[in-house]
Image (cartoon, rainbow, N blue to C red):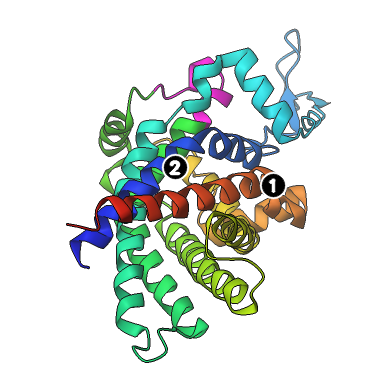
Amino acid sequence: MGVKGFVEGGIASIIAGCSTHPLDLIKVRMQLQGETPAPAPAVQNLRPALAFHSGTHATTHIHVPAPPPPPRVGPVAVGVKIIQQEGVAALFSGVSATVLRQTLYSTTRMGLYDMLKQKWTDPDTNNMPLSRKIVAGLIAGGIGAAVGNPADVAMVRMQADGRLPLAQRRNYKSVVDAITQMSKSEGITSLWRGSSLTVNRAMLVTASQLASYDQFKETILEKGLMNDGLGTHVTASFAAGFVAAVASNPVDVIKTRVMNMKVEPGTVPPYSGALDCAMKTIKAEGPMALYKGFIPTISRQGPFTIVLFVTLEQVRKLLKDY
């Protein structure tokens, strides 16, 4: 085990991440729907140009109504809009960050989970209790997220860049350029912006995804519903993806918004933290805003988990002699 488990998990994660990147991009764009910048003052005090100078200044109160929120659209419409406005290549915006993120985050979590699974599996029954699977997932996910947070921030920003006006776009050339610019303009700590959310989300995803996959697979085989093969792997993977999406989507929405917020020197940031972002989101858009992007999240988690575990099995076969 050891290094081999990290290599196998890393290769499978990179392939799965790149193949489902467009769905992840659509998810990010949907999670940012309805988010508005700081509102302009509702009342403007204007002094008439021809007013006489006197002790009492006449003022005109002009009430500027807030613009209506843009209509919310589904994942297909978001994807079509991206292609029409930015081109097909835009669906892979930030893919270099995805590669780096999977290399750091997923390699770490997959390798650690595999090590803990081997260590905590009962040698007599060759089974591991669900509670231990969950704990292993929480530990592996938390450590992996802490390692991969800089790439996660860069990926979110690169994916969200196309929705901004041309004058406000960051126009990162690559994940290295994104990390470099963020470090120079916002400080090295900006690379770990939203890290608490990233860690919480990763712990939920890893515990629900990997632990539930193993549990679903074991249940299917024990009940004799299917044989151990591709059908079982696909069924268990999709079920695990659904569980992971339900558990992590609210944290994922807040994480996306906190990471994507633009902080100008000398100005108050849009959100002071995760709780502030959650409260403002719920107040402005309702509780269900925490499940924005849920359909593409499921659509991504299912294929991602399927590709991940099917690829992992193939990689293990190729590297079994090493």
- Looking at the rendered structure, the kind of residue marked 1 is Lys
Residue lying at 59% horizontally and 56% vertically, measured from the top left = 231
For marks 2 and 1, give the one nearer the viewer. Answer: 2
Vertical side of 273 occupied by 21: above or below: above
* Quadrant (top left/top right/bottom left/bottom right) for the N terminus: bottom left
Residue 159 appearing in the image = yes
Task: Check residue 292 in the rendering and tell me which mark sits there, or answer none.
Answer: 1
Circles 2 and 1: CB distance less than 8 Å?
no
Seen at 75% across and 34% down, the residue is 42
Residue appearing at x 52%, y 53% in the figure: 305
Instruction: Return the residue nearer the eye: 209 or 273.
Output: 209
Q: Horizontal and vertical percent for residue 164?
A: 56, 24
Q: Quadrant of residue 141?
A: bottom left
SS for dot 2: helix
In 3D space, how far apart are the residues under numbered discs 2 and 1 (Cα atoms)? 21 Å
In this view of the protein, can residue 263 be seen by the observer?
no
- Can you say which quadrant of the picture contains the C terminus? bottom left
Amino acid type of disc 2? Gly
Residue 153 at what x, y percent from top left? 40, 43
In magenta segment, residue 170:
yes
In magenta, the rendered stretch is 160-171
Query: Which residue is outermost to the top?
Result: 50
Q: How far across and how far down the image is residue 124, in percent?
A: 37, 92
Residue 116 image offset from top left, x and y in percent: 32, 76
* Residue with the mark numbered 2: 17
